[in-house]
Image: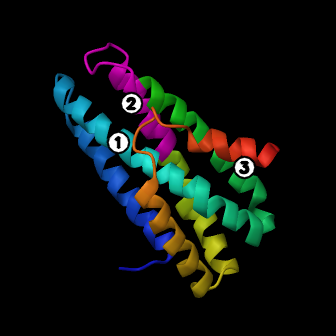
């Protein structure tokens, strides 16, 4: 298994997008199925945003300062996703807004993934060497072991943003 940070994050993106497709295929009258899928989506997104916010973004911000505005935008996109995740976690699958809120989350995260993979990752790979990306990737794997899996745990985005401000 590769420890290249970009490869690891792309693998996460692929798994998250599969959950999104499964949710979209579940159909209009599949509240229980959608509820189970949203639980999996919440866990996957919570872990993924944690490792990006705690491992990838701070390192790239330090090593590739010209990407700072992209990183700040990514933090904000994570913040929006965190808010939607928290709201979804508190809802029942048969709530009339559940599917709509999950769909908005999916659309926002898809946009974020497209930006990262299409614009951000190529620039990061261009600036950082293979060894640096593997070192960051090893840190991401360590962070993944202790990452929160639900929004009930402290928001990694809030911590990261607060740390940047202070």
Q: Earlier in the sequence, mark 1 or mark 2?
A: 1
Give the Cα distance between marks 3 and 2.
Answer: 24 Å
The quarter of the picture where the N terminus appears is: bottom left
Is residue 119 visible to us here? no
Residue 84 visible in rendering: yes
Q: Is residue 96 left or right of residue 108?
A: left
Circle 1 sits on which residue? Answer: 41
Which residue does the image show at 35% across and 19% down from the upper left?
Answer: 91
Q: Residue at x 66, y 79 (%)?
A: 126
Decide which of 21, 130 is in the foreground and name it.
Answer: 130
Residue 32, quarter of the rendered image: top left
For the residues carrying marks 1 and 2, which lies nearer the camera in this image?
Answer: 1
Q: Bounds of the magenta span?
A: 88-109
Are the residues at dot 1 and dot 2 in contact (C-beta closer than 8 Å)? yes
Image mark for residue 102: 2
Structural crowding at the residue carrying mark 2, measured as other residues with C-alpha within 10 Å and reported as few (<14), some (14–19) or many (≥20): many
| Element marked by disc 1 | helix
Residue 62 sits in quarter = bottom right
Residue found at x 48% / y 44%: 109
Q: Which of the two marks, 3 or 2, is nearer to us in this view?
A: 3
Disc with the residue nearer the chain's start (3 vs 1): 1
As drawn, the label of residue 72 is 3
Q: Residue at x 33, y 24 (%)?
A: 99
| 129 is within the stretch colored magenta | no
């Amino acid at each position: 298994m590769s420890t290249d940070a970009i490869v690891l994050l792309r693998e996460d993106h692929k798994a998250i997008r599969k959950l999104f497709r499964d949710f979209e295929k579940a159909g209009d009258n599949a509240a229980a199925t959608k509820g189970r899928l949203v639980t999996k989506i919440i866990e996957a997104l919570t872990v993924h945003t944690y490792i990006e916010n705690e491992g990838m973004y701070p390192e790239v911000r330090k090593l590739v300062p010209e990407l700072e505005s992209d990183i700040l935008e990514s933090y904000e996109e994570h913040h929006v996703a965190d808010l939607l995740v928290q709201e979804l976690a508190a809802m029942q699958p048969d709530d009339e807004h559940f599917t709509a809120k999950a769909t908005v989350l999916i659309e926002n995260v898809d946009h974020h993934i497209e930006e990262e993979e299409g614009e951000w990752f190529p620039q990061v790979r261009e600036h950082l060497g293979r060894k640096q990306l593997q070192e960051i990737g090893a840190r991401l794997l360590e962070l993944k072991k202790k990452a929160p899996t639900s929004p009930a745990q402290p928001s990694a985005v809030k911590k990261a943003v607060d740390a940047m401000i202070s």
